[in-house]
Image (cartoon, rainbow, N blue to C red):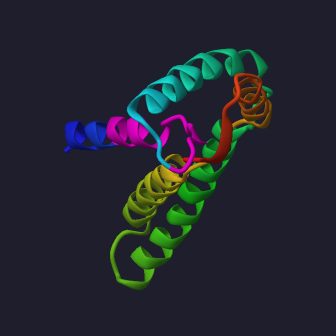
């Protein structure tokens, strides 16, 4: 059970923390050469953009929401345990664990926008290379 939960958390971190990338406009009929040049420019500009990160606080938000989810789950579990005739302590523990895991996974899996300094630097770098960014995904 614990191994399965650990594997699920690692998978969620891998999926949820993926870096967004710019999408380039390559003209009416993009060629393979244009796509390859665009990908090279994106990779180079992403590396440059790392120098301009200003921090978005996403990790702090996830931690705060995880704690709140655990507290809410604990209160709900205690009430459920008391009303259902079971153990309020056991219900509180179960509810806290479930609430914290749910809030954590929800926060990790939510797609966050790129850091504003990073995105601005990448957009500028690509423009300087003659590329036109039409979206980020």
Left/right of residue 60 with respect to residue 72 in the rendered view: right
Out of 40 and 26, give the one closest to the viewer.
Answer: 26
Left/right of residue 46 with respect to residue 78 in the rendered view: right
Q: Is residue 58 above or below residue 66?
A: above
Is residue 43 highlighted in magenta? no
Residue 17: % across, % down: 50, 37
Q: Quadrant of residue 132?
A: top right
Q: Is residue 63 above or below residue 43?
A: below
Q: Quadrant of residue 128?
A: top right
Out of 72 and 23, give the one closest to the viewer.
Answer: 23
Out of 50 and 71, give the one closest to the viewer.
Answer: 50
Q: Is residue 32 above or below residue 95?
A: above
Give the magenta range: 9-28
Residue drawn where x is 50% and y is 76% of the image: 79
The count of marks equals: 0
Left/right of residue 3 with respect to residue 97 in the rendered view: left
Left/right of residue 108 with respect to residue 67 in the rendered view: left
Residue drawn where x is 43% and y is 63% of the image: 95
Residue 75: % across, % down: 55, 68
Q: Residue furthest front?
A: 29
Quarter of the rendering occupied by the N terminus: top left
Q: Is residue 113 visible?
A: no
Q: Is residue 31 above or below residue 113?
A: above
Residue drawn where x is 37% and y is 61% of the image: 90
């Amino acid at each position: 059970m614990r191994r399965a939960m650990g594997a699920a958390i690692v998978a969620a971190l891998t999926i949820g923390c993926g870096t967004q990338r710019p999408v380039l406009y390559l003209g009416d009929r993009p060629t393979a050469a244009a796509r390859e040049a665009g990908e090279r420019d994106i990779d180079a500009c992403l590396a440059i953009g790392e120098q301009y990160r200003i921090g978005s606080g996403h990790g702090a938000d996830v931690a705060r929401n995880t704690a709140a989810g655990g507290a809410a789950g604990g209160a709900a579990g205690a009430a459920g345990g008391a009303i259902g005739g079971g153990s309020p302590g056991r219900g509180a523990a179960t509810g806290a664990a479930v609430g914290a895991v749910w809030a954590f996974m929800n926060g990790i899996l939510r797609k966050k926008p790129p850091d504003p300094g990073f995105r601005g630097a990448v957009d500028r770098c690509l423009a300087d290379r003659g590329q036109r960014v039409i979206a980020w995904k």
